Amino acid sequence: MTDTERQTRHAARPTAPPRAPPPHSSSSQPSSSSSLSLFLSEPRMLQLRQGALALLMWLAHFVEEHRVQGGNCWLEQGKNGRCQVLYMSGMSREECCRSERLGTAWTEEDVGSNTLFRWLLLNGGAPNCIPCKETCDNVDCGPGKRCKMNKRNRPRCVCAPDCSSSTFKGPVCGSDGKTYRNECALLRAKCKRYPNLVAQYQGKCRKTCEDVRCPGSSTCVVDQINNAYCVTCNRLCPELTSPEQYLCGNDGVVYASACHLRRATCILGRSIGVAYEGKCIDAQSCNDIRCPEGKTCLWDARTGRGRCSACEEDCPESRPGDSVCASDNTTYPSECTMRRAACSLGRVLEVKHSGSCNCK
């Protein structure tokens, strides 16, 4: 076959038709909405869109409500109007103000710890402080107090003791060793500063039990710094005790228990005190006495006995009238500084009397 014939036969061969694209190619794939439209009617599609929009709006409202309720609860509102002393974060106002406490307040802002720290340290408290109590209605201030609106029209609890049924007339001696002009003045001090303060006996505080009339069945006792107190003696102590309960008193007597030592103190009318735990030993110096941790042995040259004393004590700033004359004839600014000096010297110092040694 010649070349001319081959070319003629090749040209006469039928040409294959172009291949159609696959039915699922990207060029012909319908959108999701188009696919849904194949199965759902147009009104049904509209209902679905409206439902989705309502769901999104509800979620946004829920998140906003959750954010608002996650505020901070505070224990007090300062004079500057800001919230101070954080109680708890993440509390709603209803939860925070459920307490009957007068000073409780709430802030709406849900902020981080860094912002809270900056508010308290630099700004004097949290802004936008909302007090839980706006009036004195339903405010319980507790015994000896009543609610009163202050000059800034805020409710405050003030001391208002009931002095109508006072037991004592005129000056009274308090359990803090201070004389008050009357029992009502003592009750006001109890309300403001000393919740455990009670009246001991009628009249000025004394250094001896002479002329002290204790109420009821209480007995007068003089403590180690010569202050007279009225105490109730417990004369019933267990007969059988274990050796672990033995105490050596500062008087060199072994007591079966702390109860027995208190009873002896009450009967004697003067403080005895504990030298150390266990039976008394014939010690020649503090080297023979083992004190528990936190206490140091001090030697009493007058009695020839040692006692364990707590020496790790920080003394507050002394005030006029706190000075004492010690047994070494030295005047100390306070009883506390005298005890610290005793620890430094390693020997027992006791109060001879209040005030300067030059005054007696």
Image (cartoon, rainbow, N blue to C red):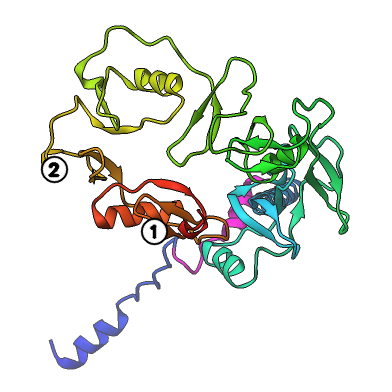
From this view, report whether residue 62 is shown above or below residue 265.
below
Residue at x 53% of width, y 19% of height: 232
From this view, report whether residue 325 is shown above or below residue 226.
below
Badge 1 crowding class, 10 Å Cα cut-off, few under 14, some 14 to 19, many 20 or more, is some
Magenta stretch contains residue 37 = yes
Horizontal and vertical percent for residue 331?
43, 59
Observer-nearest of 191 and 285: 285
Choose the circle earlier in sequence order: 1 or 2. Answer: 2
Horizontal and vertical percent for residue 291?
20, 39
Q: Is residue 323 left or right of residue 250?
A: right
**Residue on which disc 1 sits:** 330
Closest to the camera, between mark 1 and mark 2, is 1
Q: Is residue 167 left or right of residue 40?
A: right
Residue at x 58% of width, y 40% of height: 176
- Kindly report the distance in space between the C-alpha atoms of the residues bearing marks 1 and 2: 24 Å
Q: Amino acid at mark 2?
A: Ser
Element at badge 1? loop
Horizontal and vertical percent for residue 118?
57, 70
Magenta segment range?
Answer: 25-40
Observer-nearest of 44 and 150: 150
Q: Are marks 1 and 2 in contact (CB under 8 Å)?
A: no
**Residue on which disc 2 sits:** 285
Q: Is residue 81 left or right of residue 14?
A: right
Horizontal and vertical percent for residue 20?
43, 67
Number of numbered discs on residues: 2
Residue at x 22% of width, y 39% of height: 306
Magenta stretch contains residue 83 = no
Q: Is residue 220 left or right of residue 105?
A: left
Badge 2 crowding class, 10 Å Cα cut-off, few under 14, some 14 to 19, many 20 or more, is some
Quadrant housing the N terminus: bottom left
